[in-house]
């Protein structure tokens, strides 16, 4: 494309048939995200820089996490090195760096765990692969726990269900607790604590944006669709990622939500206090920050007096809402008990479709052939609807209600086997663009296949997929 800067790395070629690469040691050792400065660390309750007693603090934090999350202890002990996960990570497939094999990523922590928390590791470290926690190890943790998008694909194939994503989260939390946090994620969380959304958009900017959306939609359709802000007494509080307020193509999602609410005749609002569904607290594995971010939603729902909360598209936001909200910010006894909490915009839309309450002229989309990218967090970290697998069927039913031409990508790349877009898990930052591009390889190859075979023109998603923009 004219004017586009050529990447300073080799962009992988899309092949007809995916190939598992031979290992290339340290192929991604040159990549790491910017380290957070004091101004990004301290608002989250972390030290501003590497503390003097970092080693003791890291071991003590690991001890705390092993006690708090029993799963972590099990994951440290249970791996039998069967190798089933080794070729399941998109970052290994795209970079060939062996430390991006899930089991190797786990072993970065497991070796330290053995050294300080097992009898054999304390007395015979060389025999059991135990390692001292050194500055080099901390450096490796920082690199490779930021080359995991916490997508959980590897856990689907592990016979013991070991979830590398949880180990990554623990690794990142330990690092942040000794003063080595990640700038991108922590800066964003600090903005949410201060202003209410990832982008730092204050209330007046939101009001302006929503007003211009109303004008745009009316000009486009002739229908006066409202995009209300801080509307007390509305039935529904919509919580959606702040990217929806202005970024392309995310804003099309918000435009669509407004149209759906309008046609349903439902009163709804967004909130300037909780103008963010994304919750980067999960990325850094820190429940205190995750809770503070989520609490704004509860506060907004209570102060506006809404009856329901509906969550807009965003993979990890839905995972946090579905899997964590109840324990972080529940109970939701102040909402209408006839509706589930939380409810996804797809569940809301699907309900309307089933009742025949939405009119869609799907022939308008006959020029499109659509495929669907399952979000990792939606597929493997949550559900939708009241039947198992609803997170797979409901979005597809909605697409089929709006479009006559739908094709799925290869089965080994969809549903619970879906591949990360390359930019999930708090890695959607320019300092990691090489990782994102290479990690997107398996998804892009699957997409290319349906483009070549079926003439796919559009890919729908319930996630950001901005690694590809
Ligand atoms: S959770 Fe995802 S990114 Fe992390 S190691 Fe497993 S497959 Fe790779
Ligand atoms: S699949 Fe599970 S048990 Fe096997 S090597 Fe990977 S993490 Fe270990």
Image: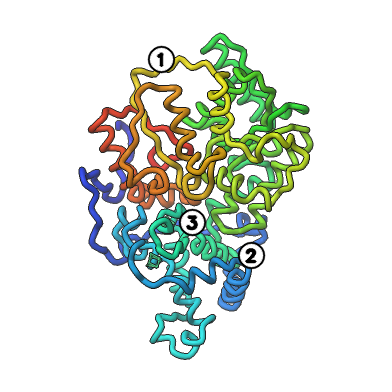
Q: Write down the quadrant of residue 399 in the picture.
A: top left
Q: Write down the quadrant of residue 468 in the picture.
A: top left
Residue 17, percent from left and from top: 21, 46
Horizontal arrangement in the rendering, residue 200 relative to residue 440 (left or right): right
Say whether marks 1 and 3 touch (CB < 8 Å). no
Identify the residue at image location x=77%, y=28%.
232
Residue at the disc numbered 3: 34
Horizontal arrangement in the rendering, residue 409 relative to residue 230 (left or right): left
Name, please, the residue furthest toward the top.
Answer: 222
> Callout 3: few (<14), some (14-19), or many (20+) C-alpha neighbours within 10 Å?
some
Tag count: 3
N-term-proximal mark, 2 vs 3 = 3
Say whether marks 2 and 3 touch (CB < 8 Å). no
Question: Between 358 and 469, which is closer to the camera in this rendering?
Answer: 358
Which mark's residue is nearer the viewer, 1 or 3? 1
Residue at the disc numbered 2: 47
Question: Between 160 and 260, which is closer to the camera in this rendering?
Answer: 160
Name, please, the residue furthest toward the left.
Answer: 16
Q: Which mark is residue 364?
A: 1
Q: From where the camera sits, is residue 159 visible? A: yes
Position of the N terminus, as image quadrant, is top left
Residue 335, percent from left and from top: 74, 37
């Amino acid at each position: 494309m004219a004017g586009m800067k050529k990447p300073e790395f080799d962009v992988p070629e899309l092949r007809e048939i995916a190939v598992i690469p031979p290992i290339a040691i340290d192929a991604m050792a040159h990549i790491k995200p910017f380290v957070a400065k004091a101004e990004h660390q301290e608002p989250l309750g972390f030290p501003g820089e590497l503390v003097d007693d970092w080693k003791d603090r890291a071991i003590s934090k690991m001890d705390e996490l092993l006690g708090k999350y029993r799963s972590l202890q099990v994951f440290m002990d249970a791996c039998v090195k069967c190798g089933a996960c080794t070729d399941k990570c998109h970052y290994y497939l795209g970079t060939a760096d062996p430390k991006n094999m899930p089991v190797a990523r786990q072993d970065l922590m497991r070796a330290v765990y053995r050294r300080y928390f097992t009898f054999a590791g304390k007395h015979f470290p060389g025999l059991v692969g135990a390692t001292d926690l050194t500055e080099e190890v901390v450096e490796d943790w920082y690199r490779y726990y930021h080359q995991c998008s916490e997508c959980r694909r590897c856990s689907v194939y592990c016979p013991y269900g070991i979830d590398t994503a949880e180990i990554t989260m623990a690794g990142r939390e330990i690092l942040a607790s000794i003063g080595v946090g990640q700038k991108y994620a922590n800066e964003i969380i600090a903005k949410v604590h201060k202003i209410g959304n990832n982008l730092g958009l204050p209330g007046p900017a939101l009001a302006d944006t929503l007003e211009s959306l109303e004008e745009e939609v009316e000009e486009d359709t002739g229908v006066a669709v409202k995009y209300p802000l801080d509307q007390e007494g509305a039935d529904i509080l919509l919580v959606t990622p702040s990217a929806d307020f202005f970024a392309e193509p995310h804003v099309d999602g918000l435009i669509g939500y407004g149209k759906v609410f309008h046609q349903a005749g439902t009163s709804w609002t967004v909130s300037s206090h909780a103008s963010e569904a994304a919750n980067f607290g999960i990325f850094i594995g820190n429940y205190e920050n995750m809770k503070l971010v989520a609490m704004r939603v509860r506060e907004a729902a209570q102060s506006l007096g809404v009856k329901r909360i509906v969550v807009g598209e965003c993979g990890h936001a839905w995972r946090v809402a579905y899997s964590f909200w109840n324990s972080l910010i529940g109970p939701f006894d102040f909402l209408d008990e006839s509706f589930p909490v939380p409810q996804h915009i797809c569940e809301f839309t699907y309900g309307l479709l089933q009742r025949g309450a939405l009119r869609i002229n799907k022939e308008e989309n006959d020029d499109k052939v659509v495929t669907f990218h399952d979000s990792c967090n939606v597929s493997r970290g949550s559900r939708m609807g009241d039947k198992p697998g609803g997170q797979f069927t409901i979005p597809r039913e909605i697409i089929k209600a709006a479009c006559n031409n739908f094709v799925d990508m290869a089965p080994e790349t969809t549903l619970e086997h879906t591949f990360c877009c390359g930019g999930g898990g708090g890695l959607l930052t320019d300092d990691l663009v090489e990782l994102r591009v290479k990690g997107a390889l398996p998804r892009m190859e699957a997409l290319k296949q349906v483009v070549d075979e079926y003439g796919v023109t559009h890919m729908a998603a319930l996630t950001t997929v901005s690694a590809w923009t």
